[in-house]
Image (spheres, coloured by chain):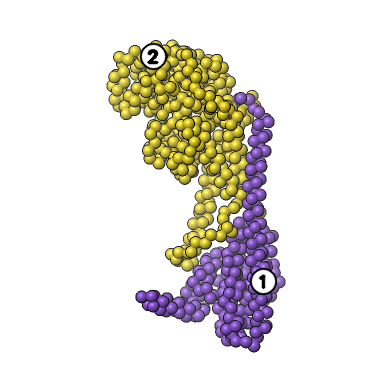
Chain colours: A purple, B yellow
Amino acid sequence: MGKFDWKKYLIVFLITALIFSTAIYLSNLASEKRLDEIKSIEDKIAIDILSSETQFNLLAESSCEDLNNPGLSADLNSLAEKLSFEEDKLGSDNQEVIGLKRYYSVLEIKDYLLVKKISEKCHVKPLTVLYFYSNAGDCSECERMGYILTYLRDEYPELRVYSFDYNLDLSTLKTLLSVFKLERKLPAVVVNSTPYYGFKSIEEFEKIMPELKTLKNQAASSSTTTSTKSK
Amino acid sequence: MIEVGTIVAHILLFISLYFEIFLLLTFLEGKHEMKKSPRESSYAPSVTVIVPCFNETKTLTKTVNSLLSLDYPKDKLSIFIVDDGSTDDTWSVMQKFKENQSISLFQKENGGKFTALNLGISQAKSEIVGCLDADSFVDRKALRRIIERFENPEISAVTPAIKVSSPKNIIERIQSAEYAFSAFIRKTFSYLGAIYIAPGPFSFFRREIFEKIGPYRHAHNTEDLEMALRLQTKRLKIDNAHDAYVYTIAPKTPRALYKQRVRWIHGFLENARDYRFLFFRPGYGNLSMFVLPTATLSIFTALYFTAYSIWNAAVFIGNKIIEFSAVGLNLAIQPIQFDWFFFKTESIFILSSILIVLTIILIVTGKYILDRRVGFSRDILYFVLFYSFLAPFWLARSVYNTALSKKTSWR
């Protein structure tokens, strides 16, 4: 049995190749399923936004309560998380990822505009942050800034954070950049139509958006009330 | 763009998977041998067992007593105990056996294990000569099972099946699973005619082969490995008696295990360098074309995946540090949500999982060889959980020592 048996080596090679390619196929299949899920979430958001816009037009003369829909494209956050996960796995230069990011960015802009319209009608200040980043290696503070905004979004569910890849080739995004006359000094955020450049800490954000503090105090007092009631 | 590191990882995973499937298929081809019940042969040539000792007061008595209890004709069995210049009471412990007719005692200046073995070989007159490390004990039937293999005149040497003696702590239990894996490997290599180690605990040789190929050599403190490689170069066959059980005392501490393994792996690499002409020569069969190249590559594969894992862990920790520097320590417990979306489904992860499952199957098969029982034990669990954290230390040190031609010591 010590002799070199080519046939056996070949058979084992075929078995190994079969297992190997099955594993790669399953991995690719899972990636495709993920991209499909992202696409279906995006489609759902598109319908949500379209529905909200239509609702806005229909009820243009109605009261703000009718328009105050807290469920408005609530899937945007979960979509951002999933898109970011997939971007990490497949790479930011993956064409499918880029396509989904473009779609996502358009949806964000639509959502932003809708929130703005509703806020104007109801005379409230929209609690939104437009965040511009780059993952082309030219923005050393973007990662830290991303953590700050994730933290703020978790801490203040009312806050809507729209993040945009500055380098994305998308005409709508270019228009948005020109509307705010945004320079390429990343990271950058736009709050209440005012651009701010460079890294901003949580405290700085709370200064830029005093509403956050109010929300925090409201949350604290409501939790005190709840705990007092429960006693 | 797929990174170079990922491509290399896939190639190494393919080779590792190939290696394990090849072994499993080879084992299944020869498994009918496993089912044979041991036959009681009357074949009983004269045998000498050499026990080299260096400071073995703790275990020597038990070792020799296990040899005296062997089921083998007493007039055919000689036991040579060789004190290789011990600095403790080994020589006085040996004296309790001086009246025994089967036992001969020798004392010499310290020169290393191979010199003690060579002294025994030079004094032996028997047909078969073997050795037993003084920290190992044999099963009553072990010699019978070994000698049965010599009935085939083509066989020049026979190796046993080694188990860890009474494993208790985690380090010993990890080795217990590892020895089961080795039992599987040794059996499979014997089918391939590719055994390249004749281990110190209870390997046997026809005495005449020492006249043909010479005595043991220093061989970078792994004389058992070099002897087997030398037999292979002369195309002398080495068999494995998978039912000849030998129990060895395994290192109990990580440090002792580390030292032993550095000696073994460094010895393997140095001998592989000395016998490099054995690589990729179809004339030397499976040993040359498959076993030695993959055994060497496995060391570098393990180190590569260690580096790969360390890199991934460093990236993860780096991200956590960046997060901490941005938002501070966030102790809020996030509700755990199970979403298939975030499951790891990268091909490297799937292939590594297949490889781990296959390794477990091979260990379970090894356990079956050793214990005739099929099952998943605590030893296997410890092995799967901890071995990959321990082995890189001695692998890296061995490669380092080999690269810089550093010598390793026995103790």
Residue A42 in view in this figure: yes
Report which residue position mark 1 lands on: A46
Residue type at mark 2?
A: Lys
Q: Position of residue B281 (x, y in %)?
A: 63, 27
User: Residue shown at 55%/40% (left/top)?
Assistant: B358
On-image quarter of the C terminus of chain B: top left
Please, which chain is the residue tagged with disc 2 on? Answer: B
Q: Residue B74's mark?
A: 2
On-image quarter of the N terminus of chain B: bottom right
Q: Quadrant of residue A178?
A: bottom right
User: Residue shown at 44%/13% (left/top)?
Assistant: B46
* Left or right of residue B270: residue B86: left
Label total for image: 2
Outermost residue on the right side: it is: A171
Taking depth in this image into account, of B195 and B23 the one nearest to the observer is: B23
Q: Are marks 1 and 2 on the same chain?
A: no
Q: Position of residue B155 (x, y in %)?
A: 54, 18
Count neighbours of disc 1 (C-alpha within 10 A) and say few if under 14, some if 14 to 19, many if 20 or more.
Answer: many
Real-space Cα distance between discs 1 and 2?
A: 90 Å
Please, which chain is the residue tagged with disc 1 on? Answer: A
Q: Position of residue B236 (x, y in %)?
A: 56, 20
Taking depth in this image into account, of B131 and A34 the one nearest to the observer is: A34
* Left or right of residue A58: residue B97: left
Would you place residue A226 above or below residue B51 in this image? below
Residue type at mark 1?
A: Ala
Would you place residue B120 above or below residue A136 in this image? above
Outermost residue on the bottom side: it is: A61
User: Residue shown at 55%/71% (left/top)?
Assistant: A198
Taking depth in this image into account, of B257 and B249 the one nearest to the observer is: B249
Would you place residue B177 above or below residue A114 in this image? above
Q: Quadrant of residue A63?
A: bottom right
Find numbered disc 2 in the image and state the secondary structure of the residue it sits on.
helix
